[in-house]
Image (tube, rainbow, N blue to C red):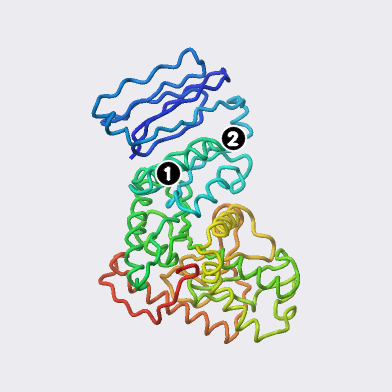
Amino acid sequence: MALSEIASSYTKTTQITPTHLISPRPTSLHHHHRLSLRPSRGRSRRFGILCSVVPSEVQAPAVPSSAEAVNNKKRECFGVFCVTYDLKAEEKTKSWKSLINVAVSGAAGMISNHLLFKLASGEVFGPDQPISLKLLGSERSIQALEGVAMELEDSLYPLLRQVSIGIDPYEVFQDVEWALLIGARPRGPGMERAGLLDINGQIFAEQGKALNAVASPNVKVIVVGNPCNTNALICLKNAPRIPAKNFHALTRLDENRAKCQLALKAGVFYDKVSNMTIWGNHSTTQVPDFLNARINGKPAKEVINDTKWLKEDFTEIVQKRGGVLIQKWGRSSAASTAVSIVDAIRSLTNPTPDGDWFSTGVYTNGNPYGIAEDIVYSMPCRSKGDGDYELATDVIFDDFLRDRLKKTEAELLAEKRCVAHLTGEGNAFCDLPEDTMLPGEQ
């Protein structure tokens, strides 16, 4: 839905001149040494400013027609990135990586409000990785997206080379290499879980089709919007051009919560906890695995000699942590969710420490654990830092763990049947074993 195109040319002048652009629709925001904004072909309701680094050469905006003036009257225009950095072209090519395109849906929401600035600062992909942020919203959130873009602009992040906003996934997802799908409808009062699966499933089916059509063929996709496991399955089923292995459901927040609880019980700092696995669904059937977890390199069961607490209290605390947070805070987790998204990305872009692993919901085909195939199920993974991963094989099981894994598996299989109409597998049939609440749901 972008209604402007921005062309660039290099100039050695380093003086800065601001620009302003009225934008009733998605707007591209670019850092360049020289920018010119011109109306896109076939679009008429636009006017812009020619932005030059020489103040005396700034061209006045064309006067809009009365119809355009009425159309734009209710929209507050905002500045467009026109910041010249003292970085020579030859220095950029030697010291910086190629620009990476990252899409974020639900970009006007609370989670994104924390996440976007971490992405722009270099905290996620590194201090030498310039980034282009492509923000997806809705008709209702377009003004809020403009506000987000303004805040990103005012932050002056050197690595943030481009910001674009839009409401059409087929345009926002163009050439993206990472897609962070956060936006989803929350579960309202009286809404059955089957209804939530259908409503949000339709969103992720459409986004999967858009990714399949226009994204990079090796795009990495992290689904955050709930129910994230089944939404990830729907998304990958609608994107056959993209490897199924590239789709993830976010269970890293659950892993972080579990590490915190083990650290508190053991009286150590949380960085002493490793090999923490969250198995299965991002729901209250999830399985925080204390059997394989380690504290200071020792099995957690040896450090915490309290089997009753591990099997009952620990598991329930982690499963219901999101709901308790809502009761205390009055809202679902946002900042900690953003941190966990950062952790999930960094676990894929940095080598996993020797002997450790991390949790992420991934496609189960070919898994070595005997888990049912063709679902998205959180499992322990390791990465070489290239964006790919392998499932950990040095995992032990006991009857208690196996029983819990089967329960969360059954729930995911039931969810899959509920969305068969969205995955190309025929008519949907909902027989959810019980209406488990998702962590963080009201």
Q: Which of these two is toward me, 20 or 54?
A: 20
Q: Secondary structure at mark 2?
A: loop
Q: Residues within 10 Å of mark 2 (few under 14, many from 20)?
A: some
The residue at which mark 1 appears reads as 145
Does residue 379 lie above or below 85 as drawn?
A: below
In this rendering, the label closer to the viewer, 2 or 1: 1
Residue at (60, 24) in percent of width and height:
88
Q: CA distance from mark 2 to mark 1?
A: 21 Å
Q: Amino acid at mark 2?
A: Pro
In the image, which disc is placed on residue 158? 2
Image location (x, y in percent) of residue 140: 34, 49
Which residue is located at x 26 percent, y 70 percent? 426
The single residue placed furthest to the left in the displayed view is 67
Quarter of the picture containing the N terminus is top left
Q: Residues within 10 Å of mark 1 (few under 14, many from 20)?
A: many
Q: Secondary structure at mark 1?
A: helix
Visible in this render: residue 187?
yes
Please tell me in which quadrant of the rendered image residue 345 appears. bottom right
* Residue at the spot 45% in from the left edge and 74% down from the top edge: 437
Q: Looking at the picture, how far across and down is residue 80, in whole percent?
A: 46, 31
User: Is residue 218 shown to the viewer in this render?
Assistant: no
Residue 159 numbered mark, or none: none
